[in-house]
């Protein structure tokens, strides 16, 4: 919905109502807006979200009461509730794949498949539910008695579709202190606007433009040589980053308007020197969730190098399975597991993987082939052709025609990628996100940047009649 013309109208209406009504009404305004947003996106998701929110509220109270009654109390409720969450996630992720392999009658199969299509945002808010319940079981946090606050935590519309995966202790206190948020806070509003503008630039100018060419390269790989397939791998590497980071920037900006700080999901990940650092910078809320709720409970690195490697591989296996039911997602996860274990073993010997940032980038880019492909077979075919076809200069003109590439398109693509790279380089060196860097500039500089970004989106963004903005990639997870 962020790419819809209706979203600015929706957001503007919510902002007006939020600041017009008394401060004590603000959490309920955000909850109502989130429910409407969810229902508009997917009515099934809205109904399931309501049921899960009520169920998590009840289970959280039961777990806390059991824990207060005795030392080991509440664990049964915690295990039961978390097991239900995992079961629902597996059912939605893998239900379709399982049914398609069964020899059912077509009509019955179609009916079941329609009901098992995963609701939008389900993976993200079910992880929040699991984290919430586990924190109560550990005594790290208390069960929230106000169901409206808790439902807003799960459903807050800027993060509903693709995260970030927020923690209770970070989000709920902000919901409870919305009374003090003033509408006219020039610094907050300017920063929020910068986040959203940069997010839309990354999405509409860079990601959606690259998506057109990536789709052609993957769907018609037999028409292209190694040069173009290698370029397609690099294009998708930039596309998925600009797509997901673009969404995250827009989400952070929207939340900041209401005085709510969301987790910064990206920290210039392609500037990482190794895979471990990459995962500290990429999808931060997911990687930290997997660390705290899976890796550490498995034993982390406390039980020797062998156990550390096994735990690492389990985490990346789960990470791959979380993203989708296909084997190619599992292979993508296992590749990152192999990369990480290689670093662990080399580090044990006092060595590092040669190549640093370049080698890390290429390793990540190669793994993205398996993430982008429709199946493991397609991923293997693409990889094989990319590595074996060779460069055929005589086919250059035909390839450019198939991709609808001309000088103007090439200049726009290169300029967009360079601008994103430059922004990440500056952010990485200054240890500060681009919107905050822009805010440090003089007013004239900020306004020039706002103007140039807005004009770029208007002139070079992919939108308009006959074109549907590419769905955010992580919406399907």
Image: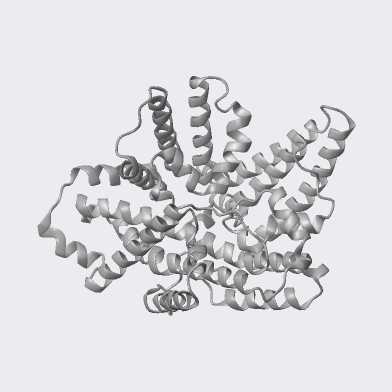
Question: Seen from this angle, which residue lies furthest right?
Answer: 69
Residue 256 screen position, x and y as percent:
63, 65
Give x and y (percent) for residue 454: 45, 77
Q: Is residue 154 above or below residue 460?
A: above
Quadrant (top left/top right/bottom left/bottom right) for the N terminus: bottom right
Q: Nearer the viewer, residue 395 or 118?
A: 395
State whether residue 330 is above or below residue 466: above
Is residue 383 toward the left or the right of residue 283 in the image?
Answer: left
Residue at horizontal 50%, vertical 65%?
Answer: 435
Residue sitting nearer the eye, 76 or 93: 76
Q: Residue 462: where, in percent of width, then height?
A: 40, 72
Q: Position of residue 376 (x, y in %)?
A: 38, 42
- For the question of whether residue 326 can be seen, the reply is no
Whether residue 209 is visible here, answered yes or no, is: yes
User: 384 left or right of 179?
Assistant: left
The image shows a total of numbered marks equal to 0
User: Relative to 266, is 287 above or below?
Assistant: above
Image-quadrant location for residue 381:
top left
| Residue sitting nearer the eye, 134 or 49 | 134
Q: Residue 239 lies in what quarter of the image?
A: bottom left
Q: Residue at x 81, y 45 (%)?
A: 143
Q: What is the residue that sits farthest to the front in this orientation?
A: 442
Question: Is 35 positioned to the left or the right of 251 in the image?
Answer: right
Q: Residue 159 occupies which quadrant of the picture?
A: bottom right
Q: Nearer the viewer, residue 71 or 423?
A: 423
Q: Residue at x 81, y 49 (%)?
A: 144
Q: Is residue 457 left or right of residue 18?
A: left
In this view, 467 is above or below 425: below
Which colour scheme appears in the figure? one colour
């Amino acid at each position: 919905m962020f790419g819809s013309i209706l979203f600015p109208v929706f957001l503007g209406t919510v902002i007006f109502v939020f600041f017009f009504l008394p401060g004590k009404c603000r959490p309920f305004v955000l909850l109502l807006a989130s429910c409407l947003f969810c229902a508009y996106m997917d009515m099934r998701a809205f109904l399931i979200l309501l049921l899960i929110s009520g169920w998590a509220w009840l289970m959280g109270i039961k777990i806390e009461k059991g824990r207060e009654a005795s030392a080991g109390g509440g664990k049964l409720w915690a295990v039961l509730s978390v097991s239900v969450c995992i079961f629902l996630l597996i059912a939605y992720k893998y239900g379709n794949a399982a049914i398609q392999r069964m020899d059912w009658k077509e009509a019955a199969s179609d009916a079941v498949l329609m009901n098992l299509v995963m609701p939008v945002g389900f993976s993200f808010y079910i992880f929040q539910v699991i984290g919430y319940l586990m924190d109560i079981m550990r005594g790290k946090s208390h069960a929230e008695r106000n169901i409206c606050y808790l439902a807003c935590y799960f459903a807050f519309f800027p993060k509903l579709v693709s995260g970030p995966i927020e923690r209770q202790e970070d989000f709920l206190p902000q919901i409870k202190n919305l009374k003090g948020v003033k509408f006219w806070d020039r610094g907050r509003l300017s920063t929020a606007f910068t986040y959203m503008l940069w997010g839309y630039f990354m999405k509409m100018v860079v990601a959606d433009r690259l998506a057109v060419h990536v789709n052609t390269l993957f769907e018609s790989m037999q028409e292209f040589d190694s040069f173009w397939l290698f370029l397609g791998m690099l294009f998708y590497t930039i596309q998925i980053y600009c797509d997901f980071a673009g969404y995250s920037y827009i989400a952070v900006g929207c939340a900041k308007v209401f005085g709510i700080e969301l987790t910064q999901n990206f920290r210039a990940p392609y500037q990482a020197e190794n895979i471990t650092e990459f995962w500290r910078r990429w999808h931060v809320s997911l990687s930290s969730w997997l660390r705290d709720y899976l890796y550490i409970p498995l034993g982390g690195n406390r039980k020797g190098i062998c156990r550390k490697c096994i735990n690492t591989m389990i985490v990346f296996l789960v990470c791959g399975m979380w993203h989708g039911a296909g084997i190619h997602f599992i292979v993508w996860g296992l590749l990152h597991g192999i990369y990480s274990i290689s670093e662990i073993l080399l580090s044990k010997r006092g060595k590092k993987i040669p190549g640093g940032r370049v080698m890390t980038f290429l390793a990540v880019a190669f793994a993205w082939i398996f993430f982008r492909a429709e199946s493991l077979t397609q991923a293997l075919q693409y990889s094989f052709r990319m590595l074996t076809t060779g460069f055929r200069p005589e086919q250059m003109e035909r390839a450019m025609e198939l991709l609808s590439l001309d000088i103007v398109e090439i200049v726009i693509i290169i300029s967009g990628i360079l601008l994103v790279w430059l922004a990440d380089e500056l952010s990485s060196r200054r240890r500060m996100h681009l919107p905050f860097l822009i805010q440090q500039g003089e007013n004239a500089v900020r306004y020039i940047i706002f103007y140039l970004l807005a004009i770029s989106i208007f002139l070079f963004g992919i939108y308009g009649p006959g074109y549907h903005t590419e769905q955010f990639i992580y919406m399907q997870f």
